[in-house]
């Protein structure tokens, strides 16, 4: 059975909170949202480019929440799009030497 849209939104918020907690610099996502400025259209502006996270760490966090919440392939695509195309921290790829 598919999770409700509301529950998928809650999962996205949980993932974003964990991503920002593991970003550089680390920040509380809820505080970031509460203190966000408002644009002319009434939307909150999250300065996501001010934060970065290792791409592998980001994928591990997202996959952990997929498994924890037993998401279907369809639900994973919805959550992935919301996380990766939404206000997530900038991901960086660390190159091995």
Image (cartoon, helix red, strand yellow):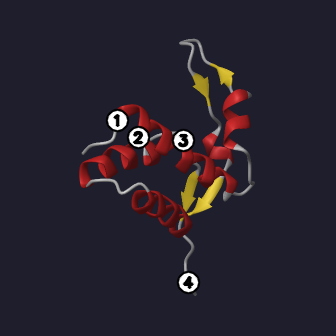
* Badge 4 element: loop
Contact check, label 4 and label 1, Cβ < 8 Å: no
**Is tag 3's residue or tag 1's residue first in the polypeptide sequence?**
1
- Alpha carbon distance from label 3 to label 1: 14 Å
| Nearest-to-viewer mark from 2 and 1 | 1
- Alpha carbon distance from label 2 to label 1: 6 Å
Dot 4 corresponds to which residue? 96
Residue 73 x %, y %:
25, 55
Give the vertical position of 17 relative to 68 (above or below): above
Please report the residue visible at 45 percent of the width from the left and 60 percent of the height from the top.
Answer: 68
- Alpha carbon distance from label 4 to label 3: 31 Å
Residue 97 x %, y %:
58, 87
Please report the residue visible at 47 percent of the width from the left and 57 percent of the height from the top.
Answer: 65
- Alpha carbon distance from label 3 to label 2: 9 Å
Contact check, label 3 and label 2, Cβ < 8 Å: no
**Is tag 3's residue or tag 2's residue first in the polypeptide sequence?**
2
Does any portion of residue 88 appear in the rendered image?
Answer: no
* Badge 3 element: helix
| Nearest-to-viewer mark from 4 and 1 | 1
Dot 3 corresponds to which residue? 13
Please report the residue visible at 43 percent of the width from the left and 63 percent of the height from the top.
Answer: 63
Residue 25 x %, y %:
75, 54
Does any portion of residue 22 appear in the rendered image?
Answer: yes
Dot 1 corresponds to which residue? 4
Dot 2 corresponds to which residue? 8
């Amino acid at each position: 059975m598919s999770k409700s849209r509301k529950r998928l939104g809650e999962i996205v918020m949980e993932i974003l909170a964990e991503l920002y907690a593991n970003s550089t610099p680390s920040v509380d996502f809820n505080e970031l949202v509460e203190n966000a400025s408002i644009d002319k259209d009434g939307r909150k502006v999250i300065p996501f480019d001010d934060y970065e996270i290792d791409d592998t760490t980001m994928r591990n966090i997202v996959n952990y929440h997929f498994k924890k919440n037993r998401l279907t392939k369809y639900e994973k695509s919805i959550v992935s799009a919301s996380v990766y195309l939404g206000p997530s921290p900038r991901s960086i790829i660390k190159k091995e030497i």
